[in-house]
Image (tube, rainbow, N blue to C red):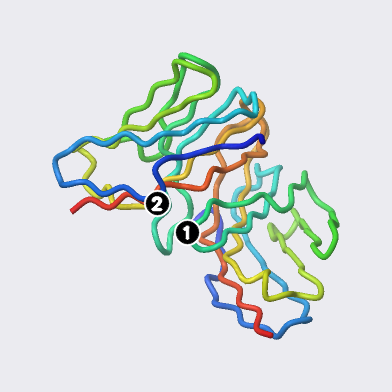
Amino acid sequence: DGGITQSPKYLFRKEGQNVTLSCEQNLNHDAMYWYRQDPGQGLRLIYYSQIVNDFQKGDIAEGYSVSREKKESFPLTVTSAQKNPTAFYLCASSIASGQSEQYFGPGTRLTVT
Amino acid sequence: QKEVEQDPGPLSVPEGAIVSLNCTYSNSAFQYFMWYRQYSRKGPELLMYTYSSGNKEDGRFTAQVDKSSKYISLFIRDSQPSDSATYLCAMSGYNTDKLIFGTGTRLQVFP
């Protein structure tokens, strides 16, 4: 059963703590992406990775970090430096970099209090 | 001005109606146009993907792109209550990883 999995579905953290969101895909896609979704706003790109061991900042990378050690995995860390971390986080992948067809995972709802 | 504008709705229609969802954009470099459907608290699902101008049909769904007017549409025929969701348009230029999303239109189809 191919697809993108994100875990957990809901995550709660106290302010000042770092938290890592998981994203795994078994589609054999080269490129992976992290977006953030807030009410009334379009999806905004946080980071993306075109290939293993490489990643680039998106439009709102401040306060976030990523790694891409394996093709299948692209975890996102929300650090304490992120001023408004509460949001719905979406991971996506595409078969190759520059291919516009991106497929999304189910998302993780992060709440920081 | 946002690069992509999309009416947030909600758009409420009776079952069986034809639904028209629209986005306008300002960047003439956009070449690829997508429509995603997103149910509440779920990830977006790719519905339609088109390149440049023209129409594309898939079952009850038709996507139209008018690059001269910088306007894209998604038509849903014979709408069903299961079509109730938020519809996001997205677009990108050639050979880029960046998709630009609209804010989404919430659609409600009542029986």
The residue shown at (77%, 57%) is: B66
Q: Amino acid at mark 1?
A: Arg
Query: Whole-Å distance between the Cαs marked 2 and 1?
Result: 8 Å
Q: Quadrant of residue B96?
A: top right
SS for dot 2: strand
The answer to whether mark 2 and mark 1 are in CB contact below 8 A is yes
The residue lying at 62 percent from left, 71 percent from top is: B84
Quadrant assignment for the C terminus of chain B: bottom right
Check the residue under mark 2 and report the chain it is in.
A
Q: How many numbered circles are shown? A: 2
Please name which of the two marks, 2 or 1, marks the residue nearer to the observer: 1
The spot of residue B51 in percent (x, y) is 77, 44
Residue placed most toward the observer, B17 or A107: A107
The x, y position of residue B48, in whole percent, is 74, 52
In this picture, is B55 found above or below B52?
below
Describe the element under mark 1 as helix, strand or loop.
loop
Residue drawn 36% across the image and 40% down it: A60
| In the image, residue B72 above or below residue B18 | above
The verdict on a common chain for dots 2 and 1 is no
The numbered disc on residue A88 is 2
Tell me if B20 is positioned left or right of A10 in this view: right
* Residue projecting furthest to the front: A1
Q: Mark 2 belongs to which amino acid?
A: Phe
Mark 1 packing: few (<14 Cα in 10 Å), some, or many (20+)?
few
Q: Which mark is residue A111?
A: none
In terms of image quadrants, where is residue A77?
A: top left
* Residue beneath disc 1: B41
Towards the viewer: B101 or B43: B43
